[in-house]
Amino acid sequence: MEILVNSHTHIGDAFIDIGDKNWKLDELVAPPHGFKHEMMRKASEGEIIEGMKKAISVMERCGTTHFIDFREGGVEGIKILKKAMGGSRLNAIILGRPLELRYDSEEVNGILRISDGIGVSSISDWDYEELKKVADHVNKKKKIFAIHASEAFREDIDAVLDLKPSFLIHMSSASRDDIEIVADENIPLVVCPRSNAFFGIRPDIESMLECGVSLLLGTDNAMISPPDIVEEMKFLMENFDVSREQVGEMVTANPRKCLNVSLGIQQSDGSKNMP
Ligand SMILES: [Zn+2]
């Protein structure tokens, strides 16, 4: 079966109107007090679901078969996404996250029971030791642990990789050395060039490819760009020195390999592997 994978979304923020303000990354999306998180706390479940359903229909219309969503809001947040998915043929790979920036083993168990793993914001938002406990727990359960890294500023790549992530998001402010380390360690990386551009950041996708990083493509926050992976592919081809073939791999072969071969993950509905 042909697949078309959007490897990074946050469709839970699709209902948020960010207006035309010139947002800085942290004031818009950083937990716990970024605008997005304040809005999500205030929103009713119905509002969030309505936004998600719109995002889901955007993905369906552009032919997406799978998407990997970073779902905020703990166990309840995951349940809301599952409600919004009702009736959709899309395959959601759901990465939940703890409600607060701390480790609670019961909560992590609860999240992992109904999801494919955990996806967190970044090492800079967390107390590192707490985050290490979350990562170790997820890895022990053989689920996905994914994390944003070096998005608007460079973070310590060794500390990030010590968490044994299944894959990383962004690396848009990483150094060439950091990119080489990620390539050497064989850690897949999801790039989201439209979201980076919104914040005035240009990821060095050319170096990533040159170093041999396995790249995946995602649309990131739905409140910033609708989750249309075909638009993301067009943007990538228009603004970066990448071939059509390379872009094709980022939405088919690379995510397939990342999700099947490297991880052998079980999807949250219990079915094994992608078709
Ligand atoms: Zn993200």
Image (spheres, rainbow, N blue to C red):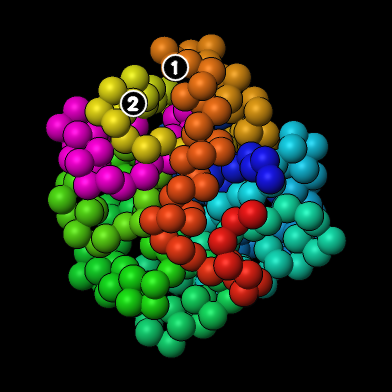
Res 37 seen here: no
Q: Which residues are magenta?
A: 172-196
Nearest to the observer: residue 18 or residue 168: 168
Residue tagged 1: 242
Placement of the N terminus among the 4 image quadrants: top right
The residue sitting at 39% across, 77% down in the picture is 141
Query: The residue under label 1 is which amino acid type?
Result: Val
Are discs 2 and 1 less than 8 Å apart at CB?
yes
Nearest to the observer: residue 272 or residue 131: 272
The numbered dot on residue 95 is: none
Query: The residue under label 2 is which amino acid type?
Result: Leu
Give how far across and how far down residue 74 sits, in percent. Answer: 53, 72
The image quarter containing residue 144 is bottom left
The residue sitting at 60% across, 19% down in the picture is 234
**Residue at the extreme bottom of the image, as rendered:** 106
Placement of the C terminus among the 4 image quadrants: bottom right
Secondary structure type for disc 1: loop
- Label 2 crowd (10 A; few <14 / some 14-19 / many >=20): some
Give how far across and how far down residue 57 sits, in percent. Answer: 79, 44
Position of 95 with respect to 206 (left or right) is right
Secondary structure type for disc 2: helix
Q: Earlier in the sequence, mark 2 or mark 1?
A: 2
Give how far across and how far down residue 68 sits, in percent. Answer: 56, 52
The residue sitting at 80% across, 37% down in the picture is 61
> Magenta stretch: residue 173 in it?
yes
**Residue at the extreme right of the image, as rendered:** 87
Position of 125 with respect to 23 (left or right) is left
Residue tagged 2: 209
